[in-house]
Image: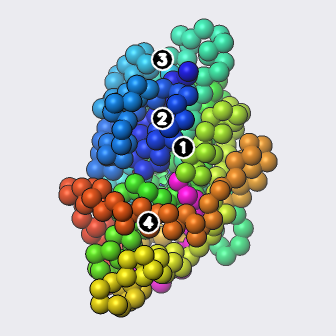
């Protein structure tokens, strides 16, 4: 049995990784998470008593605490997901993104390198650090084309810039120190347990509450939607068979405009939880001021990961979205508890953008 250290394991994607690994039963998992507003141990039902699971309440900004985790748990692999992840918040509070996403990543790379140098040759050779990043580092596409592993970096938001910096650092630790780092850049994820500030869960939550569903601009922004469990399978494939120093782009083969995503959510809500008034959920759609610097389109060419590692998404956008809406309808308690803190679904990231209308 090998040991995987997952940073950010109480977040949306990290918790999906940990649920999957614990269900599989083959590996031990160490969850290293600071439990920010986005981290929630309730996303890991049953984990606390699982013999293969340990939790470390550690901030990746704290270099010595991160190093201690390596010394104590002696992992065979790392999946680095801990990050500030919301673009709107990065507009209001860019410094926090630099501290966690950039400085935190350096702390992780330093600790991993130090630790890997203490390993016997065979274990050092098998050791892997998987750095998880986003397609937002590549900037915005026009109506045609798709991002791939050779696309130029052109980050536009503070979030994307901080992730771009962390990618460069991860790559440099491979080139300079031969730390066996593998990078992934994926498109927008959706699925169960996503904090309801991101488009899909926010719209579902607003729809369930019969509140206005705020769509930025005219909803023309286009993303390549990736069901979170398909992302997890791709990450595990990269961890098992990805080549150190390489980048793998991960997409969902499901490009949709935001407005079409919201309309699809509305149709599912009408079917699965019709409003008492009988009015269609789509009547709640409200167009609001766009996000400053909002990238128009992202899309991923996932040929490399499909051809080399056989990682193909299983869910279509329709099947994944149905599962997601069903999950939120069945788990309103989880959402309510997420929202019992400071964030209650209000608009963020309007710096320079004027008031939402
Ligand atoms: P999330 O915001 O849901 O979760 C982030 C987790 O990291 C939370 O559990 C939080 O408590 C933890 N965390 C934050 N700051 C920390 C710190 N300083 N120290 C330790 N833990 C800290 O994010 P997510 O959507 O699960 O994304 C995970 C990773 O995947 C991020 O690196 C993100 O950039 C990347 N990514 C996400 C998407 C997406 O669509 N969600 C797309 C591409 C890439």
Which-is-in-front pick, marks 4 and 1?
4
Q: Earlier in the sequence, mark 1 or mark 3?
A: 3
Residue 318: % across, % down: 58, 70
Residue drawn 56% across and 28% down? 26
Residue to which mark 4 is pinned: 326
Instruction: Verify CB contact (< 8 Å) between mark 4 and mark 2.
Output: no
How packed mark 1 is, by other alpha carbons closer than 10 Å (few <14, some 14-19, many 20 or more), is many
Residue to which mark 3 is pinned: 74
Q: What element carries label 2?
A: helix
How packed mark 2 is, by other alpha carbons closer than 10 Å (few <14, some 14-19, many 20 or more), is some
Q: What element carries label 1?
A: strand
Q: Is mark 3 on a helix, strand or loop?
A: loop
Disc number for residue 132:
1
Q: Which of marks 4 and 3 is nearer the N terminus?
A: 3
Residue 59: % across, % down: 33, 34
Instruction: Verify CB contact (< 8 Å) between mark 4 and mark 3.
Output: no
Of residue 162 and residue 25, the one placed in the foreground of this image is 25
Residue to which mark 2 is pinned: 22
Which-is-in-front pick, marks 2 and 3?
2
Indicate yes or no whether the magenta region holds residue 255: no
Q: What element carries label 4?
A: helix
- Name the quadrant of the N terminus: top right
Of residue 269 and residue 212, the one placed in the foreground of this image is 269
Look at the image and give the residue range highlighted in magenta: 214-228
């Amino acid at each position: 049995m090998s040991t995987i250290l997952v940073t950010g394991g109480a977040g949306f994607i990290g918790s999906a990784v940990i649920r999957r690994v614990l269900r599989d039963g083959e590996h031990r998992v160490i969850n290293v998470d600071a439990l920010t507003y986005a981290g929630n141990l309730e996303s890991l039902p049953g984990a606390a008593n699982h013999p293969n699971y340990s939790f470390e309440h550690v901030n990746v900004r704290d270099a010595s605490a991160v190093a201690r985790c390596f010394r104590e748990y002696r992992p065979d692999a790392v999946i680095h997901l801990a990050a500030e992840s919301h673009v709107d918040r990065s507009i209001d509070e860019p410094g926090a993104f630099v501290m966690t996403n950039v400085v935190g990543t350096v702390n992780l790379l330093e600790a991993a390198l130090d630790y890997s140098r203490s390993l016997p040759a065979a274990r050092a050779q098998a050791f892997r650090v998987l750095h998880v990043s986003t397609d937002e580092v590549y900037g915005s596409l026009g109506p045609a084309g798709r991002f791939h592993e050779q696309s130029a970096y052109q980050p536009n938001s503070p979030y994307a810039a901080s992730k771009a910096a962390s990618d460069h650092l991860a790559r440099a630790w491979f080139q300079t120190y031969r730390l066996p780092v593998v990078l992934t850049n994926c498109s927008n994820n959706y699925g169960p347990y996503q904090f309801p500030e991101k488009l899909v869960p926010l719209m579902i939550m607003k729809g369930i509450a019969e509140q206005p569903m705020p769509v930025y601009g005219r909803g023309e922004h286009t993303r390549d939607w990736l069901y979170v469990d398909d992302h997890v399978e791709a990450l595990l494939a990269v961890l098992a068979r990805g080549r150190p120093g390489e980048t793998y782009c991960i997409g969902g083969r499901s490009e949709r405009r935001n407005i079409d995503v919201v309309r699809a959510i509305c149709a599912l809500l009408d079917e699965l939880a019709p409003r008492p008034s009988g009015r269609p959920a789509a009547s709640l759609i409200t167009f609001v001021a766009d996000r400053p610097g909002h990238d128009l389109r992202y899309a991923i060419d996932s040929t490399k990961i499909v051809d080399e590692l056989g990682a193909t998404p299983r869910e279509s956008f329709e099947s994944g979205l149905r599962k997601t809406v069903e999950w939120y309808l069945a788990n309103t308690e989880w959402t309510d508890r997420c929202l019992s803190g400071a964030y209650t679904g209000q608009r963020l990231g309007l710096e320079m953008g004027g008031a939402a209308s």
